[in-house]
Image (cartoon, rainbow, N blue to C red):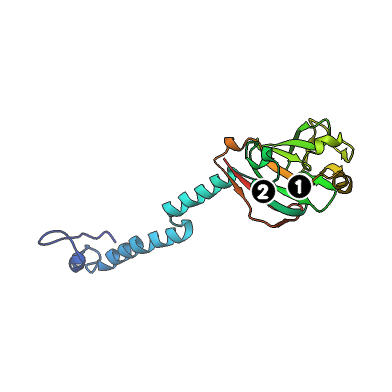
Amino acid sequence: FNPYYFAYAGLPGPLTIVNGINEQFPASIWGILIGAAIAIILPVVLIQIFGYGEDTAAQAEKEHVQTAQANEETVYAPFSGKVIPLSDVPDEVFSSGAMGQGLAIEPSENKLYAPFDGTVVMVAPTKHAIGLRSASGVELLVHIGLDTVTLDGTPFALKVKEGDTVKKGEVLVEFDKAIIEEKGLSTITPVIITNSHAYQEILIEELEESALGQKLFTVVS
């Protein structure tokens, strides 16, 4: 349209648009109107196609959640049974928290399962306790029964050895609750994160009963 535009009395504004002229099209206002329409409509179309940038706050929250999830690990119940707060365990070695944070379970079954994917880092010679380390470094002690070291391994059958890689839900130890109880010992089993000090927070689920594979702890780095 090749319009010429004249503005009078200061800057151009909406009321001066009629002053657009062209030698070929004296009423070249159409060219200006089309140009204005393109200037208004094109950005709207482009925004619909490509979208706005994500809201800064929303993006920050999304990144925070992703980071938090990346820095959390879940420890699952190694068997089903009655859950007992660690402070209520009738053995000061565990109830004092000196060994680390955790809880205890009075098992309702005779098998101990891996509570996460990891490595067996310790097996007691008397087979009553096993230590595990997850890929991210969470160190867990499961001590089957109280004072069961005195049984010299009799009611326990190991299914893994030190150095083995295990998957969540894999059987680690089989044991006989009846033999433990016949000897007058408790089957209460502390489940403890022994390197609790290395973590920002250990979130312990509030449970009265645990099912095999149910979440017990969330370990936050």
Q: Which quadrant holds the N terminus?
A: bottom left
Residue 210 location, x and y as percent? Answer: 73, 55
Disc 2 crowd, CA 10 A, few/some/many (<14, 14-19, 20+): few
Q: Secondary structure at mark 2?
A: helix
In the rendered structure, the answer to whether residue 152 lies left or right of residue 212 reads right
Q: Which residue lies at the image location 75% right of the left edge and 55% below the top edge?
A: 211
Q: Which is more toward the observer, 5 or 64?
A: 64
Q: Which is more toward the observer, 92 or 109?
A: 92
- Quick check: marks 2 and 1 in contact, CB under 8 Å? no
In the figure, residue 199 lies in which quadrant? top right
- Give amino acid for label 1: Ile
Disc 1 crowd, CA 10 A, few/some/many (<14, 14-19, 20+): many
Residue 32 in view: yes
Disc on res. 88: 2
- Give amino acid for label 2: Asp
Q: Which quadrant holds the C terminus?
A: top right
**In this figure, which residue is indicated by the disc labeled 1?**
188
Q: Which is more toward the observer, 199 or 125?
A: 125
Residue 100 location, x and y as percent? Answer: 63, 38
Q: Which residue lies at the image location 69% right of the left edge and 51% below the top edge?
A: 84
Whole-angstrom CA distance, mark 2 to mark 1, is 11 Å
In the rendered structure, the answer to whether residue 209 lies left or right of residue 159 reads left
Mark 2 and mark 1 lie on one chain; the one further toward the N terminus is 2
Q: Which is more toward the observer, 149 or 159?
A: 149
